[in-house]
Amino acid sequence: MVDGLGSALGEPLFERAAIIGVGLIGSSLARVIRRKGLAREIVAFDASSKVRARLRDIAIADHVAETAAAAVEGADLVVLCAPVGAMGEIAEEIGPRLMAGATVSDVGSVKASIVAAVAPHLPASVTFIPAHPVAGTEESGPDSGFATLFLNRWTILTPPEGADPKAVARLAAFWKGAGANVETMAAAHHDLVLAITSHVPHLIAYNIVGTAADLEEVTQSEVIKFSAGGFRDFTRIAASDPIMWRDIFLNNREAVLEMLGRFNEDLTALQRMIRRGDGEGLQSLFTHTRAIRRSIIDQGQETAAPDFGRRTKDDG
Ligand SMILES: NC(=O)C1=CN([C@@H]2O[C@H](COP(=O)(O)OP(=O)(O)OC[C@H]3O[C@@H](n4cnc5c(N)ncnc54)[C@H](O)[C@@H]3O)[C@@H](O)[C@H]2O)C=CC1
Ligand SMILES: O=C(O)C(=O)Cc1ccc(O)cc1
């Protein structure tokens, strides 16, 4: 087993999967759907004509549609994989063309605002089950995706109350087939958890790289020259897609501001420890954070070294 994804499942879970927005996540999904036989047929649509042309070249989908509405025709699974801010307008376009009984999902990094933007456009005959694969890289576009992206990572489902349990179970089986572990929670809870585990860390990375870039005028090339330290890890995160992250902060505003408030308080406490020479306080916090990192590794959530080389040689 080269890819760690195990052997193919039996019958496909879906007949026709439509992927709307085929960048890093959409193309990774297309690749794993095909590799694992999770749907019989894959139809793709991307708003960019350049991306559509590229999709025809790399042939990771069976068909590339010219509109989102055409892509969802006859699809029993529709997954919206565009930036968070584009989900509402896509839903508005595809709503009238969705097949009765279809499952509509998404992969957006924020959940409550997507529910608010998407749900009003969907007919009662479909089941909407928002999802978030907590897996990714700083890259974007259809060439950056790979089939093992979701392997051993969490995918969070946030089904609304009263969602058809069979449809929820089928979507959970789909993500498990893609290699993910699946957890279910409320959309608002998801947004709070992700604000502290993903959104605020990205904001910190954007900020520290921005601060260093300002200093660079003073220090000339020293920021780049000595970036082998912790700063280098921040630059990877700060290279993440600007549109995607703009949308995340605009659409998870309250949770991010709440977590930033707490972060600022703790940062002020650290500042005070440094000013007062409180070595005991600093050491105690750093010992605690080191233990957190080690417990994450012990739970198999992370390798000791950055693991963005998880792409295997046949990950096409
Ligand atoms: N990049 C990451 O690490 C992760 C991203 N996500 C979420 O996945 C979604 C997609 O992110 P990526 O694949 O990284 O972005 P990406 O930038 O690689 O791909 C997004 C694609 O959507 C297309 N697009 C934009 N507006 C569209 C529209 N109205 N209709 C159809 N296509 C449209 C773009 O042309 C682009 O090809 C975002 O909602 C993001 O929050 C979730 C988990 C991880
Ligand atoms: O590249 C990284 O370190 C990430 O954190 C990737 C990522 C970005 C956005 C998500 O919603 C989930 C995962």
Image (cartoon, rainbow, N blue to C red):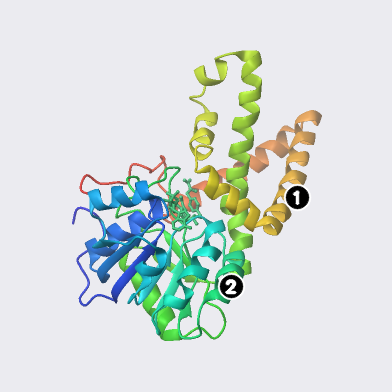
Name the one closer to the observer, 16 or 255.
16
- To which residue does mark 2 refer? 186
- Kindly indicate the quadrant of the structure image that contains residue 162: bottom right
Q: Alpha-carbon distance for marks 2 and 1?
A: 23 Å
Which quarter shows the N terminus?
bottom left
Q: Image height check: is 38 above or below 208?
A: below
Q: Is residue 316 visible?
A: no
Residue at horizontal 58 percent and vertical 52 percent from the top? 247
* Amino acid type, mark 1: Gly
In the displayed structure image, the side of residue 249 where residue 67 appears, left or right = left
Q: What residue appears at the point 57 percent right and 82 percent down from the top-left corner?
A: 161
306 relative to 219, above or below? below
Determine which residue is flagged by label 1.
261
Viewer-nearest residue: 69 or 102: 69
**Residue 47, image quadrant:** bottom left
Q: Is residue 2 visible?
A: yes
Give the answer, above or below, for where 80 lies relative to 235.
below
Is the residue marked 1 within 8 Å of ligand 2, measured from its CB? no
Near-viewer residue (62 or 299): 62
Q: Secondary structure at mark 1?
A: helix
Residue shown at 58% from the left, 38% from the top: 205
Image position of 130 (left or right of 209): left
Give percent across and percent down for residue 73.
35, 74
The kind of residue tagged 2 is Ala
Of label 2 and label 1, which has the lower sequence position? 2
Disc 2 residue crowd, few under 14, some 14–19, many 20+, Cα 10 Å:
some
Picture coordinates of residue 81 (x, y %)?
A: 44, 59
Mark 2 vs ligand 2: CB below 8 Å: no
